[in-house]
Image (cartoon, grey):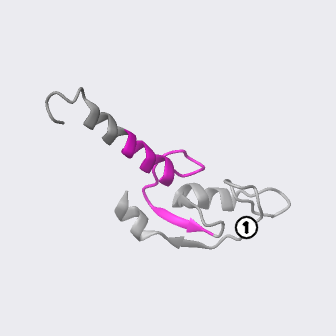
Amino acid sequence: AKRGDGGGAAKRQKAEWNAIADEYACPITLELPLDTVIAEDGRIYDRSAIEELIETRDGDGELRSPHTNEPMGPKLVPALQVRNTI
């Protein structure tokens, strides 16, 4: 930060980081994912968290999005570009 800016640059940088963290946070863990995947609902998840959810889905066998609660399939796609961004 420049001298005399009252910490404004640092505050802006922190706000930008928080916005990135909010955008990429796993809806299950609420943390930045380490092994990023995209589920069929289009959201980014930490692989271990979403795989555990898929394995322990409701007794009726229907998998629902942790983000929207809408039905979704179990297919996961690696999100390498997201992981590189994080």
Q: Is residue 7 left or right of residue 81?
A: left
Q: Quadrant of the C terminus?
A: bottom left
Q: Is residue 81 left or right of residue 9?
A: right
| Residue 22 percent coordinates (x, y) | 49, 47
- Residue at left offset 74%, top offset 58%: 57
Q: Is residue 43 placed above or below 4 in the rendered structure? A: below
Residue extent of the magenta highlight? 15-39
Q: Is residue 33 placed above or below 81 in the rendered structure? A: above
| Residue 85 percent coordinates (x, y) | 36, 61
Residue 13, quarter of picture: top left
Q: Quadrant of the N terminus?
A: top left
User: Which residue in the protein does label 1 denote?
Assistant: 72
Residue at the outermost right position: 60
| Residue 42 percent coordinates (x, y) | 61, 67
- Residue at left offset 63%, top offset 73%: 75
Q: Nearer the viewer, residue 11 or 38?
A: 11
Residue at the outermost left position: 3
Q: Amino acid at mark 1?
A: Met
